[in-house]
């Protein structure tokens, strides 16, 4: 006999890309009452098959500050597990490796080129890597252990973000040296290609609707990459480090916002 579950549909107003999806997965998949999650990113909707009250799920989602609200809730048969679940796990490992690799590459390049934009973008890569790692770690893991790991990761990311902003302020005051614009541009182009590969991989585990979503919504990662490229061009034209510092400041703030979201999961 097939079990009947509650199917609750949520609207997630600020769910624009796979990064928000993974945050939601990490927050909900460890709950014993949750059976299956189905995402519709273009329409910013999430379907959850579960037991218990929808309000318990909404409380978790509200903690992510993604603009969650309940659309409907009714009894329905839950879909069976498919090969797509195993495929998604493999893809999460692949994008995790790519993000961690480019975190290291961009951080080293940022130090060599004296570029805060590259250093900040490397932390943006690290932030995505943390989200994917937590999503993988959450599968079959105890809720308490998941929260502890999320807390450590969030504080680590937050500390790096704060140190980055402090260094930006120091360079604003002291002006600092002009970064190597050529290294900024070249490394950011490769990082942009890496993000494009991640988008391609993530599409493989999705429905056609989700594939269209990747074309509709531009991820913050790509914006950050393009920002560093533009900053590199402006550094070349102005012979000043101000464009690099401005872009670095913006990306460091985005990194701190990501750290805050992860810390919310640890509560």
Image (tube, rainbow, N blue to C red):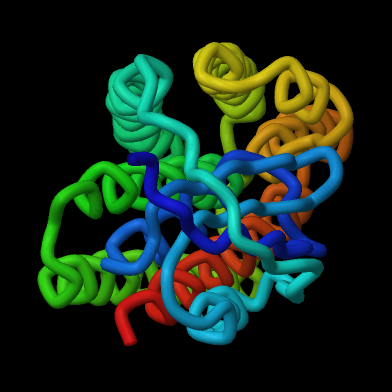
Residue shown at 28%/62% (left/top)? Answer: 30
Location of residue 231 (image quadrant): top right
Residue 249 placement (x, y as % from top left):
66, 64
Residue 36 falls left or right of residue 136:
right
Number of marks in picture: 0
Most foreground residue, 32 or 242: 32
Most foreground residue, 77 or 222: 77
Q: Point out the image quarter for the C terminus.
A: bottom left
Residue 160 falls left or right of residue 19:
left
Q: Is residue 247 above or below residue 169?
A: above
Residue 101 placement (x, y as % from top left):
31, 26
Residue shown at 76%/39% (left/top)? Answer: 223
Q: Is residue 82 above or below residue 255?
A: above
Residue 126 falls left or right of residue 240:
left
Location of residue 58 (image quadrant): bottom right
Most foreground residue, 50 or 155: 50
Q: Is any atom of residue 42 visible in this view? A: yes
Residue shown at 45%/45% (left/top)? Answer: 128
Q: Point out the image quarter for the N terminus.
A: top left
Most foreground residue, 202 or 193: 202
Residue shown at 31%/34% (left/top)? Answer: 100
Q: Is residue 197 above or below residue 149?
A: above
Q: Is any atom of residue 105 visible in this view? A: no
């Amino acid at each position: 006999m097939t079990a009947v579950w509650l199917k609750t549909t949520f609207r997630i107003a600020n769910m624009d890309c796979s990064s928000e999806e993974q945050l939601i997965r990490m927050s909900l998949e460890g709950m014993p009452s949750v059976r299956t999650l189905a995402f519709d990113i273009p329409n910013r909707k999430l379907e959850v098959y579960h037991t218990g009250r929808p309000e318990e799920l909404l409380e978790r989602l509200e903690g992510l500050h993604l603009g969650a609200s309940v659309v409907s809730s009714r009894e329905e048969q839950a879909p069976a597990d498919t090969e797509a679940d195993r495929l998604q796990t493999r893809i999460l490992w692949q994008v995790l490796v790519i993000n961690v690799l480019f975190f290291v590459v961009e951080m080293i390049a940022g130090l060599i080129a004296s570029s805060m934009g590259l250093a900040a973008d490397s932390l943006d890569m690290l932030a995505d890597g943390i989200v994917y790692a937590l999503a993988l770690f959450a599968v079959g893991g105890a809720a308490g252990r998941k929260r502890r790991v999320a807390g450590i990761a969030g504080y680590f990311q937050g500390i790096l973000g704060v140190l980055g902003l402090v260094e930006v302020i120091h360079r604003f005051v002291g002006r600092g040296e002009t970064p190597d614009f050529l290294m900024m541009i070249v490394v950011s182009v490769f990082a942009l290609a890496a993000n494009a590969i991640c988008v391609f991989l993530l599409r493989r585990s999705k429905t056609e609707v989700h594939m269209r979503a990747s074309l509709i919504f531009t991820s913050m990662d790509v914006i950050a990459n393009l920002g560093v490229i533009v900053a590199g061009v402006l550094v070349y034209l102005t012979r000043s480090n101000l464009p690099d510092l401005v872009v670095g400041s913006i990306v460091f703030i985005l990194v701190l916002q990501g750290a805050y979201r992860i810390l919310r999961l640890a509560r």
